[in-house]
Image (cartoon, helix red, strand yellow):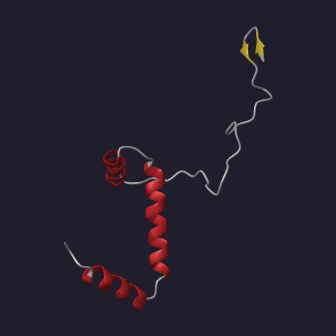
Amino acid sequence: MRTEEGFDFSKGIRGPVLPQTGNKERITIRLDADILDWFRGLVNEAGGGNYQTMINDALREHMERRRESLEETLRRVIREELRPTG
């Protein structure tokens, strides 16, 4: 509402106008500049996208690999190394 002095924000509510959807949560995190540059570079090479989604995907992949047993990890690495080239 506009008053003579300007806008009246006395009944305003802080935060996003629209409620968040999905499973994502807004946080503040400090990352090294070289890490951000690397992910932004990947987005640029891909011709677009979202570097935050790429960081999220990398963290999820790390989590999933941490759940692997040593045997599963060794089997995966050996399969990757023995994959035919050409």
**As displayed, is residue 32 above or below residue 11?**
below
- Left/right placement of residue 35 relative to residue 12 reads left
* Quarter occupied by the C terminus: bottom left
Number of on-image labels: 0
Compare residues 49 and 12 and report the one nearer the observer: 49
**Where residue 4 sits in the image (x, y, percent)?**
76, 8
Q: Is residue 1 above or below residue 57?
A: above
In the image, is residue 84 above or below residue 49? below
Q: Which percent across, then down, holds residue 22?
A: 65, 54
Q: Where is residue 20 in the image (x, y as percent from the top left)?
A: 67, 47
Question: Residue 81 falls in which quadrant of the image?
Answer: bottom left
Extreme left residue here? 86
Q: In which quarter of the image is the N terminus?
A: top right
Indicate the position of residue 33 as horizontal and vertical percent values. 34, 50
Please report the residue visible at 46 percent of the width from the left and 78 percent of the height from the top: 66
Residue projecting furthest to the top: 4
Quarter where residue 2 is shown: top right
- Which residue is nearer to you in this view: 78 or 28? 78
Q: Residue 75 falls in which quadrant of the image? A: bottom left
Residue at image point 46% right, 83% down: 68
Give whichever of 13, 37 is nearer the camera.
37
Residue located farthest toward the right when viewing the structure as drawn: 11
Q: Residue placed at 46% from the left, 65% from the top?
A: 59
Q: In the rendered view, would you say 9 is above or below 19? A: above
Q: Which residue lies furthest to the bottom in this view?
A: 71
In the image, taking residue 23 as reference, residue 71 lies left or right, namely left
